Image (tube, rainbow, N blue to C red):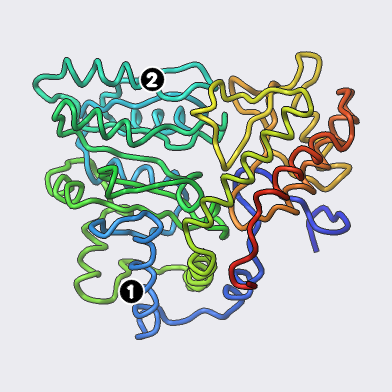
């Protein structure tokens, strides 16, 4: 029984945690097992190999940590850097702000490059900093690939190009929490040194697993990094990897089996097809917003996110009322505006194991909520725009052809 029951299914369209597909739920419905038995190491070995595929790396070393994205952040930082190291970090929204706060509290010298919320990272400033850093005092570049608070996606290939153009050895650390398994992400091709994500986003699992993937360069940096780490220490993992037992502490058996099922679903659909599906859903959502006469928080098309859209509302509407009304009346969960955009935007999450008809149901619900709070929306306008696009672009389901 739900803590606060509502008839039918909850329409979960926050940008994480997301809907969990039934095969994953069923896979996790099992008793505990002895993680020191042969079964769990055998399972873990296959999971580690397959996790590399979602990062698109053949050279990276993956770590599956019982934590959230916040813990994965800390793992990436403390294993590769030392207190006092200078890092360049981009502030473009709430989650990049929180990562910067963590960086500062861990004792790093954080060079913050701030942009207006709704804009992407200012890479012209990065170019200037790299050009003037003749003695390579910058030890790392930290960037959030997809800022969930504003629906902004940054161009990682451009960051790598700048590092290469200036022949700069700084580590390239990327938060891919709301992008990996949904947006185009190429760890090896883009020369990313540490990439991370969480289980509750595009992997469509419960919260509780943080995934960190380290390049050979990052593993080498870990040998001299002086930051204190215990729970997140890669060395402990690597020791158990060599032993073939994989776990320095007790993993969640249920989440491991859930991860196996989640990865199988992604590979059955095809990772590139998953990315294309997210592109369709993102485009359809933006067409609906345009039909409603509302604006995207993201200021340029090049920054549009295909996993979350932050919708600006008129000044006479408090966006938090849209979120409250959706949940109370229609069993629809939308994302609140956070920090600087609180009350100004609501967020539609369109990531994970999600299809076109589910999205259309969400858009219909949003239209009814907008009408409820006094916005003069024409019912069916956004749904019609999205449906017209999706009916022309949605392919046949591969496994059913």
User: Farthest residue in the left direction?
Assistant: 135
On screen, 378 above or below 253? Answer: above
Q: Mark 1, residues whose alpha carbon is within 10 Å: few (<14), some, or many (≥20)?
A: some
User: Is residue 155 shown left or right of residue 146?
Assistant: left
Residue at mark 1: 45
User: Farthest residue in the bottom direction?
Assistant: 38
On screen, 401 above or below 210? Answer: below
Q: Are the two marked residues, 1 and 2, in contact with CB atoms closer than 8 angstroms?
A: no
**On the image, which quarter does residue 46 sit in?**
bottom left
Q: Describe the element under mark 1 as helix, strand or loop.
A: helix
| Residue drawn at point x = 26 percent, y = 28 percent | 87
- Of callouts 1 and 2, which one flags the residue occurring earlier in the amino acid sequence? 1
User: Is residue 176 shown left or right of residue 275?
Assistant: left
Q: Describe the element under mark 2 as helix, strand or loop.
A: loop
Q: Position of residue 148 (x, y in %)?
A: 54, 36
Residue 122: mark: 2
Question: The C terminus is located in which quarter?
Answer: bottom right
**On the image, which quarter does residue 140 sit in?**
top left
Q: Nearer the viewer, residue 105 or 244?
A: 244
Q: Nearer the viewer, residue 332 or 28?
A: 332
């Amino acid at each position: 029984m739900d803590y606060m029951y509502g008839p039918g299914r909850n329409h979960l369209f926050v940008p994480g945690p997301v809907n969990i597909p039934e095969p994953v739920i069923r896979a996790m419905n099992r008793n505990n097992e002895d993680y020191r038995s042969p079964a769990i190491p055998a399972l873990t070995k296959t999971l580690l190999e397959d996790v590399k595929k979602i990062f698109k790396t053949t050279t990276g070393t993956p770590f599956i940590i019982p934590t959230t994205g916040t813990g994965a952040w800390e793992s990436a930082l403390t294993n590769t850097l030392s207190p006092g190291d200078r890092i360049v970090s981009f502030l473009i929204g709430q989650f990049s702000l929180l990562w910067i706060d963590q960086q500062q509290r861990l004792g790093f010298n954080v060079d913050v490059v701030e942009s207006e919320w709704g804009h992407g990272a200012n890479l012209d400033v990065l170019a200037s900093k790299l050009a003037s850093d003749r003695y390579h005092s910058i030890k790392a570049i930290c960037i959030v690939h997809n800022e969930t608070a504003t629906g902004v996606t940054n161009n990682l290939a451009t960051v790598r190009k700048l590092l290469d153009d200036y022949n700069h050895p700084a580590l390239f650390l990327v938060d891919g929490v709301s992008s990996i398994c949904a947006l185009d992400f190429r760890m090896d091709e883009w020369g990313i040194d540490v990439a991370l994500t969480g289980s509750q986003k595009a992997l469509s699992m419960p919260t509780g697993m943080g995934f960190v993937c380290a390049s050979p360069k990052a593993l080498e940096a870990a040998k001299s990094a002086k930051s204190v780490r215990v729970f997140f220490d890669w060395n402990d993992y690597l020791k158990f990897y060599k032993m073939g037992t994989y776990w320095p502490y007790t993993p969640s058996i249920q989440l491991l089996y859930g991860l196996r099922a989640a990865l199988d679903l992604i590979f059955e659909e095809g990772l590139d097809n998953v990315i294309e599906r997210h592109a369709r859903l993102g485009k359809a959502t933006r067409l609906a917003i345009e039909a409603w006469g509302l604006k995207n928080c993201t200021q340029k098309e090049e920054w549009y996110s295909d996993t979350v859209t932050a919708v600006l509302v008129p000044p006479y509407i408090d966006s938090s009322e849209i979120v409250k009304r959706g949940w109370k009346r229609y069993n629809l969960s939308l994302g609140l505006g956070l920090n600087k955009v609180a009350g100004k935007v609501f967020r539609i999450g369109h990531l994970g194991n999600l299809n076109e008809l589910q999205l259309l149901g969400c858009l219909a619900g949003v239209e009814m909520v907008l009408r409820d709070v006094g916005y003069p929306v024409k019912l069916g306008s956004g749904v019609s725009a999205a449906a017209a696009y999706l009916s022309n672009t949605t392919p046949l389901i591969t496994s059913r052809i």
